[in-house]
Image (cartoon, rainbow, N blue to C red):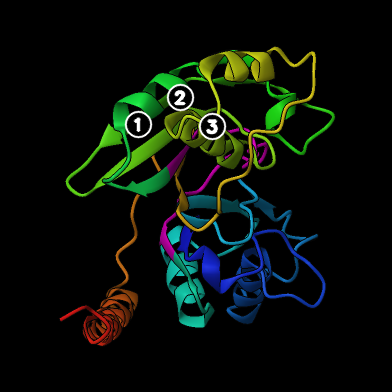
């Protein structure tokens, strides 16, 4: 089942005692709708454990249930708060949500940045490298990144990263390194030294809020499920947030100069 959520609403994706997390909310909703009894007996899995503050448009959860895909999505959406399911499919018994063909992350910057300088830095990350200077993971530091580019858009710059898997904090540290190079606070030689992995270098950690898990891709399609009730709820929420943003914009104008 594909799910979407705003990272700022949760203390990360993975379950943590006493904290509201994405996984905790997903399990709570599935149990309440009686799609599953609990995480263990349903063999519940999450595809990607996003950091606190990181949002997702296409994370994936997998579980055993007697519900048909459409019923699971609609039942889940009726009970979940802050997480929305929008696609589902039946999978084989040996399916593992963790074994994805590709994960796609996007980090959004405003349009004031130099996309060419950032892109030149990001391209150095493509291929297989030892990223021990770019992750908190100490045991699995060799990763193959298939795509790392900066893409100018109308009023923003999208930093896209695609790979079969990523490590803890990896994307945010790659973004920070590219931004330091753009600002002249580090050089491509520093980046190469950090990628070499033979000495310890810290090129910083970018904030989590602009980072979005766009999609998790497998070797098959996960069809969308129409859920008109939830679609209306999401549109109403969007309209409410747009009204709030308009009021805040007007308040900000009061502080502008003469």
* SS for callout 3: loop
Q: Which mark is residue 122?
A: 2
Q: Which mark is residue 150?
A: 1
Using residue 97 as the reference point, say whether residue 230 is left or right of it. left
- What is the spatial separation of the Cα atoms under label 1 and label 2, in whole angstroms? 7 Å
Along the line of sight, the residue nearer the viewer: 47 or 19: 19
- What is the spatial separation of the Cα atoms under label 3 and label 2, in whole angstroms? 16 Å
Q: Earlier in the sequence, mark 1 or mark 2?
A: 2
Along the line of sight, the residue nearer the viewer: 21 or 36: 21
Q: Residue furthest front?
A: 258
The correct choice, above or below, for 181 with respect to 239 in the image is above
Residue pictured at 28% horizontal, 45% vertical: 112
Residue pictured at 28% horizontal, 76% vertical: 238
Q: Which mark is residue 185?
A: 3
Q: Earlier in the sequence, mark 3 or mark 2?
A: 2
* SS for callout 1: strand
The span picked out in magenta is: 85-106
Residue pictured at 34% horizontal, 76% vertical: 230
Q: Assess whether mark 2 and mark 3 are in contact (beta carbons under 8 angstroms).
A: no
* SS for callout 2: helix
Choose mark 3 or mark 1, whichever is in front. 3
Q: Earlier in the sequence, mark 3 or mark 1?
A: 1
């Amino acid at each position: 089942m594909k799910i979407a959520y705003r990272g700022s609403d949760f203390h990360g994706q993975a379950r943590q005692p006493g904290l509201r997390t994405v996984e905790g909310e997903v399990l709570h909703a599935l149990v309440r709708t009686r799609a599953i009894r609990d995480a263990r007996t349903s063999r519940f899995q999450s595809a990607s454990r996003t950091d606190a503050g990181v949002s997702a448009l296409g994370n994936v959860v997998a579980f055993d249930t007697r519900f048909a895909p459409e019923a699971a999505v609609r039942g889940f959406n009726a009970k979940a708060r802050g997480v929305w399911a929008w696609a589902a499919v039946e999978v084989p018994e040996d399916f593992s949500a963790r074994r994805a063909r590709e994960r796609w992350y996007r980090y959004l910057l405003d349009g004031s940045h130099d996309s060419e300088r950032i892109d030149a830095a990001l391209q150095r990350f493509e291929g297989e490298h030892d990223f021990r200077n770019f992750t908190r993971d100490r045991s699995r530091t060799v990763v193959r990144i298939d795509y790392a580019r900066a893409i100018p858009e109308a009023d923003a710059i999208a930093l896209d990263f695609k790979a079969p898997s990523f490590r803890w904090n990896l994307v945010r540290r790659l973004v920070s390194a590219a931004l330091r190079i753009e600002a002249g606070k580090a050089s491509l030689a520093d980046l190469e030294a950090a990628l070499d992995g033979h000495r310890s270098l810290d090129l910083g950690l970018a904030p989590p809020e602009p980072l979005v898990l766009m999609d998790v891709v497998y070797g098959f399609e996960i069809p969308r499920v129409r859920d008109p009730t939830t679609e209306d709820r999401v549109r109403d929420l969007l309209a409410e947030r747009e009204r709030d943003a308009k009021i805040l914009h007007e308040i900000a104008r009061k502080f502008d100069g003469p």
